[in-house]
Image (spheres, rainbow, N blue to C red):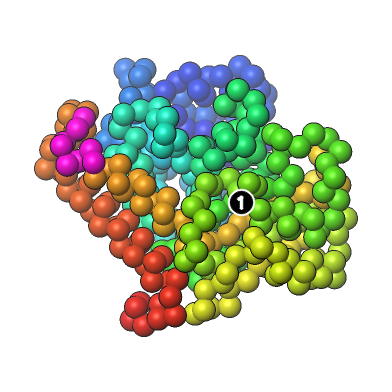
């Protein structure tokens, strides 16, 4: 029985889970909305945050109960979207509460970033910036899943197929924790201590090979070397980053599942350094790709002989943040749609939150930019 908590302010989503898998989930771990609030957070960050604050004790009691069952709590992970009201607003509130309640426990987020060209909600720039600010302040690591990039990779018209790629990557990333092992990816704490040498620059770009939405069964990727080469290719990244010549890799971990041996992984790593897609490392720390063989689940038939996932800490992520900042600046300059926020909080409070979030993300982008140069450590002093 999964130990995950499922929380949504709109009831239909959770109720669909119980209809599809009535015996799989613990009923005590399902929260399907608030009486009198059938519309959920209505795609407004302020609504999700305020509703979450009113009922935060319910959520924290659910979490504390599940944590109490854990023999060895290594980390907490949250999966959410940053565009809507529940994922961004309630998600931000939960990050604050978890930080206060479990200050020494590493917190990791699997965050779905929205389409920039085909927005699902007019408040997306506001919601996203506020959520990003909280992810910067209250998490130790964030795996970014870019819906726009994944949709371009997806040959199906059903956008739910995006979840297949996201699910495969999450499965590989968490396999070492679910099936006891040792190494750089044995738990989230050790993984992100390697991936994020500087605390705020902890946003990771995921890659996956072979892509489950594109490659049929019987993929010709059969070795660790081939997997690593595919993982480095931009078309296998689940985030669309501009190929900026100034971008630098801070660190990366490649998780390979299959018949490969440690010696084969080391040899593959040496060979890919000549690959045209191999990222240029920063100069102020030993930026490198750490290969790691992860065990396979004994309960699942592998979809290919060898599969892999890559998580990369790259300064190129700052350009993605810059696009959210630009969209926010355009809207806030004219106070566009601000009335949706002032229904739930004062205009003064809303503007103060936007200003704080903008300052947080602007300073983070500047830090990533400084990390591309040789004088980053002096910049941080």
Q: Residue 262, how many percent across, how many down?
A: 83, 68
Q: Residue 60, how many percent across, how many down?
A: 42, 43
Residue 88 on the magenta span? no
Q: Is residue 145 visible?
A: yes
The quarter in which the N terminus is drawn is top right
Q: Is residue 207 left or right of residue 282?
A: right
Q: Is residue 74 visible?
A: no
Check the image and report above or below for 23 versus 274. Answer: above
Q: Is residue 227 left or right of residue 164?
A: right
The quarter in which the C terminus is drawn is bottom left
Q: Residue 252, how many percent across, how many down?
A: 61, 64
Q: Residues within 10 Å of mark 1 (few under 14, many from 20)?
A: some
Q: Is residue 310 left or right of residue 102?
A: right
Residue in the picture at 33% in, 25% down: 42
Residue in the picture at 41% in, 57% down: 318
Residue in the picture at 69% in, 34% down: 213
Work out whether residue 319 or residue 90 is closer to the camera in this orientation and state it.
319
Residue in the picture at 36% in, 57% down: 137
Write down the quadrant of residue 367 in the picture: bottom left
Work out whether residue 89 or residue 359 is closer to the camera in this orientation and state it.
359
Write down the quadrant of residue 300 in the picture: top right
Magenta span:
330-337
Check the image and report above or below for 15 versus 215. Answer: above
* Residue placed under numbered mark 1 in the picture: 234
Check the image and report above or below for 154 versus 224. Answer: above
Q: Is residue 47 left or right of residue 73?
A: left
């Amino acid at each position: 029985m999964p130990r995950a908590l499922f929380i949504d302010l709109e009831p239909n989503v959770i109720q669909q889970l119980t209809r599809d898998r009535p015996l799989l989930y613990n009923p005590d771990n399902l929260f399907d909305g608030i009486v009198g609030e059938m519309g959920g957070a209505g795609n407004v960050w302020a609504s999700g945050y305020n509703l979450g604050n009113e009922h935060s004790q319910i959520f924290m009691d659910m979490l504390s109960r599940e944590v109490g069952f854990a023999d060895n709590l290594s980390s907490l992970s949250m999966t959410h979207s940053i565009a809507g009201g529940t994922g961004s607003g309630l998600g931000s509130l939960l990050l604050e509460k978890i930080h206060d309640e479990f200050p020494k426990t590493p917190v990791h987020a699997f965050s779905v970033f929205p389409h920039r060209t085909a927005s699902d909600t007019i408040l997306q720039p506001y919601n996203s910036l506020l959520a990003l600010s909280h992810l910067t302040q209250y998490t130790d690591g964030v795996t970014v899943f870019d819906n726009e990039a994944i949709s371009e990779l997806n040959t199906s018209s059903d956008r739910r197929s995006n979840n297949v790629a996201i699910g495969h990557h999450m499965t590989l990333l968490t396999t070492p924790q679910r099936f006891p092992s040792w190494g750089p990816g044995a738990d989230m704490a050790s993984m992100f201590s390697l991936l994020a040498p500087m605390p705020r620059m902890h946003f990771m770009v995921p890659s996956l090979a072979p892509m489950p939405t594109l490659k049929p069964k019987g993929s010709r990727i059969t070795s660790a070397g081939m997997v690593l080469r595919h993982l480095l290719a931009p078309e296998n990244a689940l985030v669309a980053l501009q190929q900026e010549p100034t971008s630098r890799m801070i660190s990366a971990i490649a998780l390979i599942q299959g018949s490969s041996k440690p010696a084969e992984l080391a040899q593959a790593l040496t060979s890919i350094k000549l690959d045209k897609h191999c990222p240029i490392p920063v100069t102020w720390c030993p930026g490198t790709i750490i290969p790691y063989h992860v065990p396979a689940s004994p309960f699942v038939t592998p979809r290919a002989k060898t599969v892999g996932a890559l998580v990369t800490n790259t300064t190129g992520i700052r350009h993605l943040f810059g696009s959210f900042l630009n969209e926010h600046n355009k809207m806030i300059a004219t106070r566009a749609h601000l009335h949706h926020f002032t229904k739930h909080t004062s205009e003064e409070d809303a503007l103060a939150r936007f200003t704080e979030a903008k300052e947080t993300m602007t300073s983070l982008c500047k830090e990533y930019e400084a990390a591309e140069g040789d004088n980053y450590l002096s910049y941080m002093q």
